[in-house]
Structure formats: C-alpha cells, structure tokens
Amino acid sequence: MTINEKGQVGAFRQEDLAPVPMASVGPSTGTTTPSIHSGKGLDEKQIERVTERAILPDQLGNELSRQIRHKYASSYRKVFGAIFTVNCAVFVALMVIAKGNPNSRDVGSAASANLMVSILFRQEEFVNLCYEIFTCVPHSWPLSIRKRLAKVFHYGGCHSGAGTGAVVWYVLYTVLATKEWIDEPVQDQLVNMSTSWILVSMFVIILTAAHPDLRRKFHDYFEAFHRFAGWTALCTFWIHNIFSARVTARQWDTSLGYVLVNSPNFWFICVSTSCTLASWSRLRHQVVYPEKLSDHATRLHFKYRGMAPFYGLKISDKPLTEWHAFATIPDIDPESGKINGFSIVVSNAGDWTKKQIMKPNERKLWVRGAPLHGLLYTSKLFRRIVVVATGSGIGPCLSLLFADITPRRVFWSTREPNGTYGPGVVAEVRRADPNAVIWNTHERGYPDIVREVYQLVHESDAEAVFIISNPKVTEKVVYGMTTRGIPAYGAIFDS
C-alpha cells in the first residue's frame, strides 16, 4: 500500500506484504516477531522487531448478492418492511371481515395504534428498555444470535415503519369519514371530517420532510416540520377523537365518557401524548463549562448530574428549532475518583458546532429528555471487539473506553490527534488500549482502513467491529467487514 503526495492511498502491492521494521513506520497494527541479523560493520547481532501482515480475505458471495444483502436489505429496511407487511395483513383481514366495507372506527384504531408505536420508539425510557432486553444475554449464547441482537439500534425502522403505516391508515379513515359526512351531514360529522383532513395534511408534511434525501439536504427545515406539524397533529388528534366519540355516542345512544373509556383510540392517544410530555417536561437550561481543545474541537463539561457510560443527550441553544445529539463521557473527580459530571466532544462540522467551539466562556445550553442508549451499548454482547473512529468520532468511543467492560483494540484515524483533541483525549485512548493505533493522517495520509481494521480483528480474535465515523467511511468499513463474515456496526444516519 502506497501513499502519494496528496495523501491518498495507492494500490496494494505485493512488496507491501514483506516484513517492515517498526522503527521505520511508527505505530503499526501488525503483530511482531523477533528477527536476528548482522548489520554491516557490526560484530554483534542485532534484534529487530518486524511486522507480520494478515492477508485480507476475499469477500463472500458475488457482487449482486453482496449488494442486496449488505446494502439494500439492511436491518433498518427489514424492520420497516416487516411492520408495513403486518399492516397490510391487518388491512386485508378487515376488508375480508367487513366484506369490502370496513368500519371507520376499526380503521381509526389501526391508525392510532401505529402512531402510538411510532412515538414510543422515540421515547427515551422505552428505547433504553429495548436496549436492556436485547443486550441481557450471556456470552455463552451463539455468536449468530448475539450479532443479530446487536442490531437493536436499527429501532428507527419501527418508528418510520409504524409512522408510514399510520399515515396510510389515516388516509383511509379520512375517506370513510368524508363518505359518512356526505351520507349524514350533521355538525359532529363535519368536525370529524375536517379534523381528519387536517391530520392527513400534517402527516403528509411530516412524511415528505422525513425522506432521506430531503432530510439530509434541508435538515433544519426537517426538524421544524417534524416538530411543529407533529404538535399540530397531536392537538388536532384530541379534538378529532372527542368529536368522533360524540358521533359514536349518538349512534350507540350512550354517554361520551363511556365511548371514550371503551375506545382504543382514546388510550392510544393518551400513551402518545404522555411520551411527548415526558420528553419536553424535562427541558432544562444547564450551565456548561467549555474546554477548548483547538480551533477544530471543544469539550463541553456539564456538572448538574453524573452520567454513566453508554448514554447520549440532546442539547441546543434554540430549543424550538434545532437539537443536536451527542454521546456523553463521564467526568471523574481526580481526588475521589467518582463521577461528578459528564462531557461531550464537539468538532467543527457546521455552523452550530463552529459557534460552540468559538465560545470559550461559561454559558448555558438547553438539555431535553432523558439520557439515551446508543449503538456502542450493544458492544456488551461480545467477548472482544475492535473500536474504530475517525476524527471526532473518538468522542462517543471515549464512553465505551471508560466503561472498560469489553476487551477491545482501538483504531483512531485523525489529523494531528494531540494538536486537535489535546493530550488528555489521546491519553484516555492509550489508557484503554496501550497498543491503540492512532493514525495521524497529516503524517501518514489516509489509511486503507478496511485492511487496517481487519489486521486488528486478526490480532485480537475480535468477534465484532464498531465504527463511529462519517457516512462514507462507516459504510465502507461495515460493508468491508460484513462481506467477509465479520459482524460490524455503524451509526444509522437516516433513522
């Protein structure tokens, strides 16, 4: 493997497989064995450590099968497809039972149930519970089971699958409500139909804005549409639910309260509303203590509570318009050795992050919701792992390294690690893995990251690879590992 003047990785050549003296290349991911030889003009033999490179195996299957299995048929899409298939089956069952004329109340209940499931998978305590259930199995279980349980972080497929199902069901309900108003044009039916159309409009806006392409290109607008259209839909849903119950109460000749208590819609919307209130009721303005690492990165320290490893938190300076999620790192009191707060590493990735880096003074930021488990929590499922990070991706990894639960090797590729992130961060990485490979791209160019990561897997006999990086590198490493039979996990960027 060669590196040209622009820092790009060249083709892998046969001579690259030859042993290379470690002293000539700096940190290496290779294993070492002693080599004895005589130097010119020297009377005694010298002992030199040389690197043995593992041979990167071929990818499994053909190109088409790899693309389908590891790219297009992702776990996220499988979960989405499974939920949508269940909804289709329920729809067919309703049509058969009702002989082609489904009851609007049953259709409304299906829509409310999907909406509730969609919101539940954005509620912090519920998501944390899912993580705890999926990661509680012992290491004695077969790897084939544990590597699938580790994909619990694809729960976003439940959110989007159920959300899309709710929209489709509600479109059908609105059509039926409109038909009922045409057949019986009374005030309750009119309000029921009108609120239904408002809900459909809000759902369509949310669904359109959540499309991956639009979400990436106009992320701030996506957040605004998602939040305000969601709140509008929730308020409208309550109005609609009450007037729909009034229509049913008149038809059944009973009280409104009796209909509500016996309506699945009512309880579904109670759960949905509670989830939303639980998150926003914990909105707090907390003091933050910046530790500027460089012009590219800062570390923000919070002291209002301790934080165990493997949690993330949302922060903002404009709580109604934008939120940013970060993995937290426990802060330790140097005297007592106890956790006395937590911190997050912020690197320059846009206007908001740059603004935080340029503000070195103590200030306040908004914090919302409960701490949330993330991808790296599933590392507990494996006996040994390789942790891969590029740039500021080391921030989330520091929490895993602090926990010191799973034996691991670390590969961190970044530009000037000491100058950009400070000796403290580098020391934390070294403390977790004394043989960590910290690849300085300024000096060594960009690594052949798949080959380097495989080398660490080979050395440590790791069961899985976890990577925190940008979408392009994450996809490259996950694809490069999984197509060679090695479980690999990276963040989902459109969940």
Image: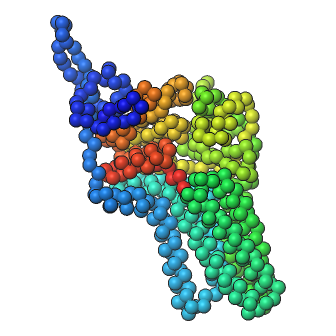
- Which residue reaches farthest front? 5
Which residue lies at the image location 73% right of the left edge and 29% below the top edge? 361
Residue 444 falls left or right of residue 129 = left
Where residue 174 sits, quadrant-wise, is bottom right
Residue 89 makes an appearance in the image = yes
Which residue lies at the image location 49% right of the left edge and 48% below the top edge? 471
Residue 256 falls left or right of residue 347 = right
In what quadrant of the picture does the N terminus appear? top left
Question: In the image, residue 388 lies at what x, y percent?
Answer: 44, 40
Depth check, front residue: 414 or 50: 414
Depth check, front residue: 138 or 29: 29
Where residue 39 sits, quadrant-wise, is top left
Question: In the image, residue 351 lies at what x, y percent?
Answer: 65, 40
Depth check, front residue: 339 or 429: 429
Asked if 74 appears above or below 373 in the picture, the reply is below
Question: In the image, residue 72 lies at what x, y percent?
Answer: 42, 61
Asked if 200 appears above or below 216 in the picture, the reply is below
Asked if 267 appears above or below 3 in the picture, the reply is below
Which residue lies at the image location 37% right of the left edge and 31% below the top edge? 4
Residue 310 falls left or right of residue 263 = left
In what quadrant of the picture does the C terminus appear? bottom right
